[in-house]
Amino acid sequence: MSNEHIDEVTGVSTTGHEWDGIRELNNPLPRWWIITFYITIVWAIGYTIAYPAWPMLTSATKGVLGYSSRNDVGNELAAAEVAKGKYVAAIQSKTVSEIASDDALREFAIAAGGAAFKVNCVQCHGSGAQGSKGFPNLNDDDWLWGGKAEQIQQTITHGIRFASDTDTRVSEMPAFGDVITADQVQQVSAYVASLSGTVSDQALVAPGAKVFAENCVACHGDNAKGNKELGAPDLTDAIWLYGPGETAIAAQVRAPKHGVMPAWGARLGETKVKELAVYVHSLGGGE
Amino acid sequence: MLDNTQVERLEAEAVNSAKTRQPLYAARKKIFPKRASGNFRRFKWLVMAITLGIYYLTPWLRWDRGPFAPDQAVLLDLANRRFYFFFIEIWPQEFYYVAGLLVMAGVGLFLITSTVGRAWCGYTCPQTVWVDLFLVVERAIEGDRNARMKLDAGPWTVRKLVLRVSKHAIWLVIGAATGGAWIFYFADAPTLVVELFTGTAAPVAYITVAVLTATTYTFGGLMREQVCTYMCPWPRIQAAMLDENSLTVTYNDWRGEPRSRHAKKVLAAGQPVGDCVDCNACVAVCPMGIDIRDGQQLECITCALCIDACDGVMDKLGRERGLISYATLSDYNANMTLATAGGSSSVNPSLVRAADGTFSDKVAHFHIRKIFRPRTYVYMAMWSLIGLGLLYSLLTRDRLEVNVLHDRNPQFVTLSDGSIRNGYTVKLLNMIPEPRTIVVTIQGLQGAEMSVVGIDLPVGRSVPISVEPDRLKMLKVFVRQPAGQIQGTAQTFKFRVEDKASFESDEYTATFNAPEIAR
């Protein structure tokens, strides 16, 4: 500017911009600030060339360094798989009992199985594997189909009453409401309840025992201890899948409910099922 | 209606008035400290040698801890989260010892500052020590004050370029050595030094060395006194810790003023003259570039080099040393009162002297008694109490600990015989570098028994567990109580862990939950 204008009040030069007699003071930013600002611009240009940046029609520019956060994640996941490799290989080659008796392998399998459980099993068995009415509690020591690690593995692999798996565990209790009279239902329910607790009418127990001997021992056994081959529950213990007490028992005698568990073997693979079996076995009730 | 001139004009001015506003930024004025010599300089060399020696040599000290722990005397093992200090090993949860040491350092600073002023700043602060070291290099290459000023003002010649390049190169080497020594505190030093020079050390080691090289070079070589004046909060805090009985570096103007370069002429004119000959030696040696004769100021780090410089001049003039000296404000004030005849006149040095020219008896001198006053007693007591407390806690601390987490989901499990089972994660902490066998026992909880995941046999109420040296062992423990013996929905009981060999033990009070209707 040829004719620089100095503001009288402040003694600062003006930019030459004037609006209705009001002039803009020229207080430039400090040089270090300006230089830093220019450096950031240069840096930003270099950055957008080196890294993915500019959005195009279908995707963004790739950047000359070829960096991709998706590849990063892929590499990290691959590295994690490699790190797990030796455990996974050992789990593949060993039986679940062998895995459970090896400290390091068991720890790994419990961690891996616990994670798989939270994805695949909690929907029915609950987040703590504590189950609910109709869905077995996996923490306790009562097992319909056996609580040994191998038996648990078998159950998870092939499921229960899962029609599309030919090796699935199958059993079906008949609806005794059609076979015996309503009175007999009451009597046998009282008898079963008496095996593990007190009943409302003691007089029903003796005839109930007779009904039981005629209809139920084939599956539940002479002593009502159940049969794990058939998935027949132990009726003398404190654990009731469909609720304790004569009413709940009577309902189950008349028209039994039958739970279904899918077969997970094909879906999760043998290794994952083994890990799950070890995890479930470790919950406290494993035999 | 008032006329313009009738409006009263108030005497007021804005505190940040444009007419008097100062720029917020002032360019640094270069400082060329002259080499000082004397008692304080010798003391500072000694302190420098000791502090640098501690810094560089500590990581190389060895301390045998047996086969299960590193043998480096001082080691911050961040990867394994262990801190080793000679015979002490600290786990992360014992970090309060470090916090305690920091509190002690703080109170210790109060104590030192209230007694001898900013001794930390003047003698032992790393900034002071490293700036001193950098100045040694600068003087060795460029010469003392005058030579350096001449070189700086002169044009760029080959000689200037060579001197400057070599100076900065040596500074960078010192910076690299500083950063290099730092990382040895965090890994085994003999191993790391080989890795460092063969290019196989971790990237974080090289990054740390690079960052510390840059900071050492910048702070010690380029910024120097600006770090103390502008960056450090210490001067502001320390000023609040001084009182009238704290020793600080003081210009005794009660004997120095009126200063004069031409004492004989002034005396001949019948005017009073002080001991200060205004030679500016005190200013020339000052690493902060200040004039102590302006009084105590924020910039002064009390390095006492001006005392050395002034004492040298006083010796040459055959006068008493101590025109600049360590003095307390109370002594100084008393002597000022004496020299100014109670404040009624300007300083007259003849008032502090007896007839034979020596100091009058009324001149106050520092007495060691002044150190012992309520303030220093309180600081000393606080410092000692914290120190003793830490020491007591360190000597009696547990090297065996148990932590218990109760399973929350499910809180309890009903078993087929009606008994109730609770799950616990029991963590055993073996905090010594030796393998141990720890016996875990449950106390209370009538009839209850444990089972441990990974141990097939039923373990009853007590089980020995072997724990690796210096490690935490995590156990999954199930506690089962028979139906008939359950008393309430939440019973408390104890996990007790004991080392039968050393009789060390620890307990954890846990809760046992049961459903409301336990059969």
Image (spheres, coloured by chain):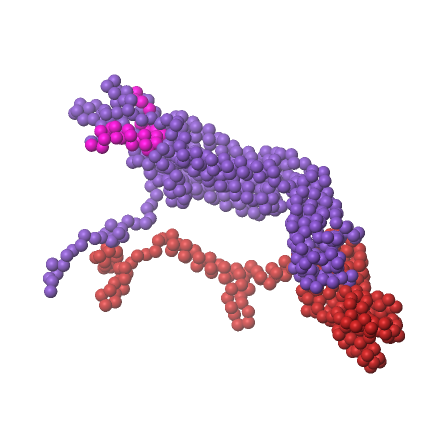
In the rendered view, does B308 fall on the left or right side of A282? left
Q: Which residues are magenta?
A: B317-344
Give the chain letter for red: A
Q: Nearer the viewer, residue B153 or B300?
A: B300
In the rendered view, does B158 fall on the left or right side of A110? left
Q: In the image, is residue A229 above or below residue B144? A: below
In the rendered view, does B343 fall on the left or right side of B33? left
Q: Is B332 colored magenta in this rendering? A: yes
Q: Residue at x 71, y 44 (%)?
A: B438
Q: Is residue B306 visible?
A: no
Q: Answer with the quarter of the image where residue B125 lies.
A: top left
Locate the C terminus of chain B by quadrant: bottom right
Q: Residue at x 30, y 33 (%)?
A: B293
Q: Nearer the viewer, residue B362 or B216?
A: B362
Q: In the image, is residue A160 above or below residue B360? A: below
Q: In the image, is residue B18 above or below residue B46? A: below
Q: Is B363 colored magenta in this rendering? A: no
Give the chain letter for purple: B
Residue B82 lies, in percent from the top left, at 61, 43
In the rendered view, does B182 fall on the left or right side of B243? right
Q: Nearer the viewer, residue B337 or A114?
A: B337
